[in-house]
């Protein structure tokens, strides 16, 4: 799957502006930068000329910083940043239809009758009905297209399943949803995506990072409203 070519290029540009990204070169700074406001270290680097950067939020002082995520650094420093809310702005994005909501509710309701599906999972999933926003990201894990709306149908420590009204043509995506304990923002690999009913699409995402906090230890905490560890 190939990601659409839209992205964020500079701090003053729209997060959906079109630009051409290029791979991280050996000459680029791999140590990360300091937040210009609070001087906290962040797992992002300055963009190179012609490269796409993302808008990030420093979670120490909540200032906005533009840069390219350092994948290796982010695996152990993702708690210090999250993608800016600008990337998840769904103004003008088609709303979820009642037919999609009904289809998802019926699908989730029948899952307990299909226990063999869950039995094949190494890590179990908990059924979950939550609205979410999905942003396709490029090879640098920078947003490269407008967000789409969807419904989560299950979630576990390693991933989630969701249904969207728009096909997710990307190998990776950032997912954001509101839990009783706050906003959860995750980045993952799109393992599979297939048609789901008339005009809808069912996708599975394997988690790679959780921005802002650590990994999800107990998926049931989302519905219970407890903090996610």
Image: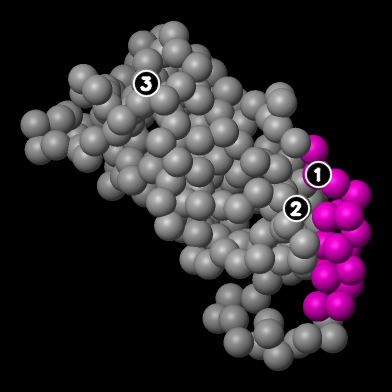
Which callout, 1 or 3, points at the residue further toward the start of the chain? 3
Q: Quadrant of residue 78?
A: top left
The answer to whether residue 173 is left or right of residue 35 is right
Measuring from the top left, give residue 84's x and y in whole percent. 54, 26
Q: CA distance from mark 3 to mark 2?
A: 29 Å
Q: Which mark is residue 51?
A: none
Give residue 66's position: percent from left, percent from top.
Answer: 39, 20
In three-dimensional space, the C-alpha distance between marks 1 and 3, rounded to whole angstroms, equals 29 Å
CA gap between label 1 and label 2 equals 8 Å
| Front in this rendered view, residue 156 or 109 | 109
**Residue placed under numbered mark 2 in the picture:** 151
- Is disc 3 placed on a helix, strand or loop? loop
The answer to whether residue 41 is seen in the rendering is: no
Give the extent of the magenta segment: 95-111
* Above-or-below relation of 130 to 80: below
Residue 193 rendering spot, x and y as whole percentages: 57, 64
Asked if the residues shown at circle 3 and circle 2 are in contact, with their CB atoms under 8 angstroms apart, the answer is: no
Of residues 26 and 126, the one drawn nearer to the viewer in this rendering: 26
Question: Which residue is disc 3 drawn over?
Answer: 9
> Considering only vertical position in the picture, is 44 above or below 156?
above
Q: Which residue is mark 1?
A: 96
Report the magenta stretch's main SS: helix
Q: Residue at x 41, y 51 (%)?
A: 2
The answer to whether the residue labelled 1 contacts the one labelled 2, judged by CB atoms less than 8 Å apart, is yes
């Amino acid at each position: 799957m190939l990601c659409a070519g839209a992205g964020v290029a500079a701090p003053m540009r729209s997060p959906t502006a079109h630009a051409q990204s290029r791979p991280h070169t050996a000459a680029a700074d791999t140590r990360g930068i300091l937040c210009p406001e609070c001087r906290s270290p962040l797992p992002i680097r300055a963009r190179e000329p012609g490269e796409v950067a993302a808008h990030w939020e420093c979670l120490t002082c909540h200032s906005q910083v533009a840069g390219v995520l350092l994948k290796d650094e982010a695996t152990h420093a993702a708690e210090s940043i999250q993608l800016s809310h600008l990337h998840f702005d769904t103004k003008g994005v088609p709303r979820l239809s009642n037919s999609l909501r009904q289809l998802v509710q019926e699908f989730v309701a029948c899952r307990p009758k299909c226990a063999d599906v869950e039995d094949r999972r190494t890590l179990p999933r908990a059924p979950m009905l939550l609205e979410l926003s999905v942003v396709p990201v490029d090879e640098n894990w920078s947003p490269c297209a407008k967000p789409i709306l969807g419904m989560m149908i299950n979630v576990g420590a390693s991933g989630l399943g969701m249904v969207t009204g728009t096909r997710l043509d990307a190998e990776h995506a950032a997912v954001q949803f509101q839990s009783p304990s706050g906003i959860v923002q995750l980045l993952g690999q799109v393992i599979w995506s297939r048609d789901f009913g008339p005009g809808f699409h069912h996708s599975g995402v394997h988690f790679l990072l959780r921005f802002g906090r650590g990994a999800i230890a107990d998926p049931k905490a989302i519905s219970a409203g407890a903090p996610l560890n």
